[in-house]
Amino acid sequence: QVQLVESGGGLMQAGGSLRLSCAASGRTLSSYVMGWFRRAPGKEREFVAAMNWAGSTTGYADSVKGRFSISRDNAKNTVYLQMNSLKPEDTAVYYCATSRLYGGWSRDTGTYDAWGQGTRVTVSS
């Protein structure tokens, strides 16, 4: 059974940085697409970043491009989301997810079949 556990969230001032981690058990992340999503208060869950199974291509939402970076440590079976230059509008619960999609990555929540419980990020102005 797949289990994804996010960590690293917290309270940060605008302009600061955080690194979120997503540790997996029951699934080798290097064989799956990995995605990060977030849900801000009162809003729908939205795509943040994703990486294809090979780690050769990544994609980002326009709102985080140039500030956030997704990466993976195969030895630790963990995926990371480095968040720099944080803004108050980045405040949300962040979720990692995996997908069996072959050949690329996806921003569609429907393509992901396993999700973590989320970690809360609050950015103060």
Image (cartoon, rainbow, N blue to C red):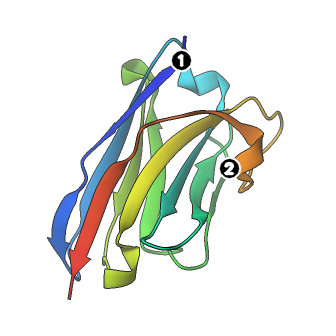
Q: Can residue 64 be seen in this view?
A: yes
Q: Nearer the viewer, mark 2 or mark 1?
A: 1
For residue 114, above or below residue 43: above
Please name the residue shown 24% across and 67% down the image: 17
Q: Is mark 1 on a helix, strand or loop?
A: loop
Query: Quick check: marks 2 and 1 in contact, CB under 8 Å?
Result: no
Image quadrant for the C terminus? Answer: bottom left
Q: What residue type is labelled 2?
A: Thr
Q: Where is residue 114 in the image (x, y as percent from the top left)?
A: 60, 30
Q: Where is residue 70 in the image (x, y as percent from the top left)?
A: 48, 52
For residue 38, above or below residue 102: below
Q: In which quarter of the image is residue 65?
A: bottom right
Residue furthest right in the image: 103
Q: What element carries label 2?
A: loop
Closer to the chain start, of discs 2 and 1, is 1
User: Which residue was labeled with disc 2?
Assistant: 57
Please name the residue shown 24% across and 75% down the image: 123
For residue 99, above or below residue 58: above
Would residue 54 appear left or right of 88 to someone viewing this image? right
Q: Residue 2 carries which label?
A: 1
Few, some or many residues within 10 Å of mark 2 (<14, 14–19, 20+) = few
Q: Where is residue 69 in the image (x, y as percent from the top left)?
A: 45, 59
Please name the residue shown 58% across and 25% down the image: 30
**Residue toward you, 49 or 96:** 96
Q: What residue type is labelled 1?
A: Val
Q: Is residue 54 visible?
A: no
Image quadrant for the N terminus? Answer: top right
Q: In which quarter of the image is residue 11?
A: bottom left
